[in-house]
Amino acid sequence: MLVLTRKTGQKIIIANEIEVTILETKGDSVKLGIQAPKHIAIYREEIYEEIKKANLQATEQAQASALNEAVSLLKPSATKQDI
C-alpha cells in the first residue's frame, strides 16, 4: 500500500487516467474528488461489497437452476409402456 500525505487542493494521478483531488479535510474526514474515464467503475467499499455479494448469489442461483435443468433432461421420462 502506498501511503501519501496531501493537502487540500493537491492531486494524485493514477495510471494517467484517474485523478484524485483532496477537496476538504475536516476532523477525521477527507472529501475526495475523483475524475476518471466512464469505463472505470468507482464505488465506496461498502457498496462494492454489496455488489459482489449480489453477484455471487445470482451466480449460485443460476448454477443451481442450470443443474436442475440438466438433471431433468437426463432423467428418463415415463413412457406409455412404463405406465
Image (cartoon, rainbow, N blue to C red):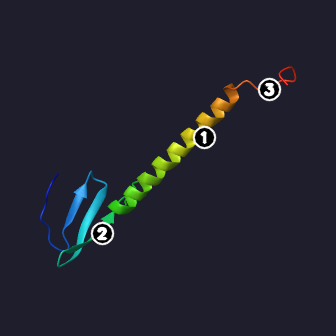
- Give residue 30's position: percent from left, percent from top: 22, 72
Task: Give, as a three-letter code, the residue at label 2.
Answer: Gly
Q: Name, please, the residue furthest toward the top.
A: 81
- Give residue 82's position: percent from left, percent from top: 83, 22
Is residue 37 visible in the rendered structure shown here?
Answer: no
- Give residue 70's position: percent from left, percent from top: 64, 31
Q: Nearer the viewer, mark 1 or mark 3?
A: 3
Where is the C terminus found, in terms of image quarters? top right
Vertical position of residue 77 compared to residue 69: above or below:
above
Task: Give, as a three-letter code, the residue at label 1.
Answer: Ser
How many other residues sit within 10 Å of disc 3, few (<14), some (14-19) or many (≥20)?
few
Asked whether the residues under the numbered discs 2 and 1 touch, taking CB atoms below 8 Å apart as contact, a structural biologist would say no
In-image side of 60 versus 30 (left or right): right
Is residue 76 visible in the rendered structure shown here?
Answer: yes
Vertical position of residue 70 compared to residue 34: above or below:
above
| Residue picked out by circle 2 | 33
Q: Nearer the viewer, residue 65 or 33?
A: 65
| Residue picked out by circle 3 | 78
Identify the element where label 3 is drawn. loop
Task: Give, as a three-letter code, the residue at label 3.
Answer: Ala
Asked whether the residues under the numbered discs 1 and 3 touch, taking CB atoms below 8 Å apart as contact, a structural biologist would say no
How many other residues sit within 10 Å of disc 2, few (<14), some (14-19) or many (≥20)?
some
Of pointers 1 and 3, the one earlier in the residue sequence: 1
- Give residue 12's position: percent from left, percent from top: 21, 61
Q: Nearer the viewer, mark 2 or mark 3?
A: 3
Identify the element where label 2 is drawn. strand
| Residue picked out by circle 1 | 65
How many other residues sit within 10 Å of disc 1, few (<14), some (14-19) or many (≥20)?
few
Q: For residue 23, which quarter of the picture?
A: bottom left
Q: Residue at x 87, y 24 (%)?
A: 80
Of pointers 2 and 3, the one earlier in the residue sequence: 2
